[in-house]
Image (cartoon, helix red, strand yellow):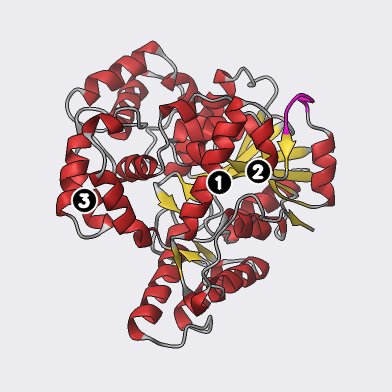
Amino acid sequence: MKITGIIAEFNPFHNGHKYIIDCAKKNNSTHIAAAISGNFVERGDSAVISKFARAEQALKNGVDLVFEIPVSFSLSGANYYAKAGISILSSVCNEIVFGSECGDIDILKNTADLLDTYEVNELIKQYIKTGINFPSAREKALKNQKLLNQNKILTLKNPNDILGVEYIRAAKELNLQSNLKFKTFKRQGAEHNSLLTKNEFASASYLRNIILNSLNANKNENTDKNINNENIEHCKRFMPKSAFDILVNEYNSGRISDINNLYLAVKAKILLKNEEMFYNITDVSEGIEKKIIKAAQNSKTLDELYFNVKSKRYTLSRIRRIILNSFLDIDNSYLQLPLPYLRVLAFNKKGEEILKTAKNKNLNIITSLKKAENLNDAAKKLSKKEFDAGNIYSLTYNEVNNDKSFLNEYTQKIIKK
């Protein structure tokens, strides 16, 4: 049995994801486990369809077992997101595979090693002092070292390369580098956030735009809200059929998420806060809380709010995460919690076989969030936040066909195949 792990968002699941899974199987993987983001994702947004729908998409396309990355970690920067994913999968996997723009694991490992050196971290600090944001400072520091270093390294401009490097660094931080092998396959087709397509490949960003634009067109024009909409049908080319069929069902049931539906609630929450209430939110520093409160007073949409807060020091993703974490009351204390349980969202017969091999027998593997309440204080705190986030996520739905059901985390059934 060769169990391979994949960390992903599947937002939504597309042909590029299927390609990585197929590559893993061609590389002799017999079982595939995935750790996926919950209903809110790293870019500071809601997932276009729920984690259960995305878990089912994965299960029908080669994944055998799907774990959830808790909301506090899936709604964090790449380092915490990677650390959570690696922590989860290391319990059942000996290998992690991922897609990357460079497609060269040795280059990614060299870059990860260099990022952990004193010299590079000092350079990053110096560049940040000039007023640029962290990603730009890191890129400049690595470029500086690349001129001096004979080893092949990246300057980390591409999102999947960045995540790959963070997976490797997380394994080292958790002392798992001797237990986990890493393998990367070159990403196929369109770039991560590209709105262009290539053959049968399109980015998740491209597909989300199609889905949300179709919903908004239907809502604004009062047209027939049926999946036969030409725009939605265009997604079919870039998704496995079973994944597309699940998207169809979610669309027709009114379960498509648009973060903009939360705007008034987000604005109200910000205006009820004072500056001190932002201090413990992850990524908050340098007076950004003042800009957020002022922007909320003068903005009419979420995009306008983000734009009014943006500066050289803060990327849009970081701003979106700060605002959404503030809205959900997720502070730094959640990121310091050890993972008290592994929550299973979906599994098949092979997935059951994976669970039987779990290396840490003391680890709590749960299929119901309700069970987490009685494990320990950390589990109670984390599961309560997950429950609240699930209810909030339901408010992001566009109510096609007047479906107003809430995603109750305690009663939601696990996906079994």
Dot 1 and dot 3 residues touching (CB under 8 Å): no
> Number of numbered discs present?
3
Indicate which disc, 1 or 2, sits on the residue closer to the N terminus: 2
- Can you identify the residue that label 1 sits on? 387
- 6 on left or right of 416: left
Quadrant where the image shows the C terminus: bottom right
Q: In this view, does 337 lie above or below 354?
A: above
Indicate which disc, 1 or 3, sits on the residue closer to the N terminus: 3
Q: Can residue 165 be seen in this view?
A: no
Q: Is residue 415 visible?
A: yes
Amino acid type of the residue tagged 1 in the rendering: Phe
Q: Which mark is residue 369?
A: 2
- Report the residue at 78% width, 44% height from top: 31
Query: In terms of depth relative to the viewer, which is nearer, 121 or 184?
Result: 121
Query: In terms of depth relative to the viewer, which is nearer, 249 or 97?
Result: 249
- Can you identify the residue that label 3 sits on? 307
Element at label 3? helix
Amino acid type of the residue tagged 3 in the rendering: Phe
Residue 177, x across and y down, in percent: 63, 21
The answer to which image quadrant residue 53 occupies is bottom right
Amino acid type of the residue tagged 2 in the rendering: Leu
Identify the magenta region: 359-364
Element at label 1? helix
